[in-house]
Image: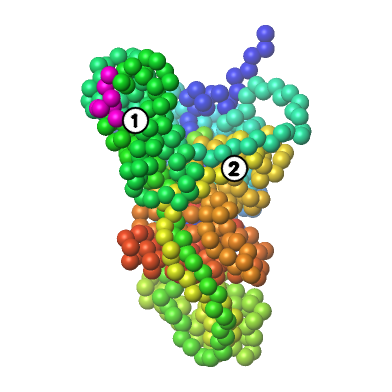
Amino acid sequence: MVYEYPLSKAIEDGYTRTPFAVTRSDIDFYKFGDEKLDKLMLIDGVACHERTKGKLEVYAANYEKPLVKPFMLVVCKDTRHAQWVEHFIKSDEFKNGAYRNKTITVHSKQKGAETEANTRLLLDVESPDNPVEIVIHVNMLKEGWDVNNLYTIVPLRTAASKILREQMVGRGLRLPYGERTGDKDVDAVMLTAHDKFQDILAEAQKGDSIFKAGNVIQAEEELDEPEEIVYTQLSLDIDQNETLEQAYVQTGLPTSEENDILLQTAKAYLQVETINYIAQNGKVPFVLAHPEKKKIVQTVTQKLEENQDWGKIFKNNENPFLTWLEEEAEQTYTTIIGKFIPIPRIRVTDAGVEEYIFVDFDLDLSVFTHMPIKNELLIQNLEDMSDRERIKGDAIDFEGYHPEKVILTELHKKPEIDYERCSKLLFKLITQVCDHYETGYGINGMQNIVMMYRREIAGKIYDQMMKHFYCENGLFQEEVIDVEYSNLPQKLNCRQKVGLYDDFKENYEGHIKSVLFTGIKKGVYPEAKFDSDESELTLARLLDRDDDVLKWLRPAPNEFNITYNRGKRYEPDFVVETADCCYLVEVKGENKLTDPDVLDKKKRGIQYCDVSTRWCKANGYKPWRYLFIPSKQVLPNSSFAQLAKRFQEQ
């Protein structure tokens, strides 16, 4: 007999701690240099370490358990890198020197007394009397070192798979109390990911990762899989027990198993017929009209009467039963309509072209609404992708950063701007922006904003410059006709069905366009498909677990009557509804940001939102905003609120 108990099963069964990946919210780390990123990861790592240390002290005190002293492991690229890290951690720049005497370095090039002293401290690192809280090493601790108190791992410039498999698994999953305690923080290990965050998440979801690998025998699969046709359907989350109790009260029926089945079946018929009515009629009112309600109820009663026993019960209780069915029909219709995102319908008339000539001007600073990135850490459970938490982090140091030069460098990339002829205006506009942000947030805040959003800031300056230079801008007369209260169902072809958070690449060699993603919670429909750019899938995952998002939709081809470029139909990527606004969202690859068709669609999307907002405000609906998001800016650690602030085009 051969038996294997893989680590994936041990994690699932609760015999290890739960691994989490940690990153900063809403930051593009590719804008950081190596040393700047290393410093930030170390600062954020020690913030997690100190947070965990406090949690362990509280747990030990509350449950009269022995105190576990956690430590942080820093993985370095090479010995020179380790020396630099040690110098930084022991300097006043790092937590005012608090860890100067609490840090050791272990690597193969150490000799003599230093090695012996550090080795003794390393082997005794679990002791509460041992002062060491940070261990720095260079690939030296692969074997023969078993500890139960490693709670924070900081991999600097190392591969995602190496850290995930060798460091986190081998060192950070052991349980200090021998079993899970039920306290999330005591049962966790933190991996500071930052620039590797997306790679770590992707690695964690692969079929051979520590979370999914097991005893699997794969049979040969047929390559030419037939396509399946799926029709999107609403999923209604209704408490059956509660509705059943109400049904008994309203119909007056005696409680019995047979009547349970009758009432539940009638409710199911109502849902099906109401959804069919909406699908067949397309444009439907916000409130169900009385004649339509009668038709739906009549269809339901006819189906019930086809069963002899149910037909008899219905006839004997016809009046209260019909009254209940009509009330349920109204409630069911209201519930279904509430699942949709109401979309304004507009009528468009083309009215010509207008040109502008370049003149000197001052910036409209009202559009420069960026805020400094919150000093916030994002903690992601690598076993359960829906489990994430945000905590406060330390401020970023911007010493030696020159924001004016950075913005100018971005503007140099615009072919329409002649630096020699425009230098005076350029410096004037850049100074206005920097002064604007410095007035609002101080020098550090201004540097923070420019570093994080330099391309967007340069883009907004560029947009205003072009309006004062030359602009070919199609003029359209538009008016809102009415509002569609329902969203169009869709016919979707697919070769494979995959959960929204699953790694579709692992066991499928086909294109993402042939995959149907299921298990969607906040979508109007519980399934959706995405195009070749995987940023759309990343955004969908973000939307589905973001607290600010109420509903989102991948609109059908004919959902919007927006046309561009001689009658082409514009199909936006997403519609998103929050508590106070609806958003039309377009995600585009960086290589297409200046494509004429893309720019024309962007212009028409903005115009649609402008016209819709004026009508919606006057008629009690939410305003509309247009978001145009470069695909590389959609990151797993993004929040929708921050994306909306950064990429709103109105």
In the image, what residue type sits under mark 1? Asp
219 displayed left or right of 386: right
In this rendering, the answer to whether 646 lies above or below 332 is: below
Q: Is residue 503 magenta?
A: no
The residue singled out by tag 2 in the image is 491
Q: Is residue 218 above or below residue 44?
A: above
At horizontal 50% and vertical 83% (from top left) the residue drawn is 429
Start-end of magenta stretch: 316-322
Q: State the separation of the CA atoms marked 1 and 2.
A: 29 Å
Question: Residue at position x 36%, y 18% from top?
Answer: 310
**Residue shown at 26%/22% (left/top)?**
317
Circle 2 SS class = strand
The structure's colour scheme is rainbow
Disc 2 crowd, CA 10 A, few/some/many (<14, 14-19, 20+)? few
Tell me what residue is drawn at x 46 percent, y 61 percent: 345
Percent x, y of residue 265: 39, 24
Label 1: which residue?
Answer: 239
User: How would you rate the neighbour count of disc 1 (Cα within 10 Å): few for under 14, some for 14-19, many for 20 or more?
Assistant: few
Q: Quadrant of residue 369?
A: bottom left
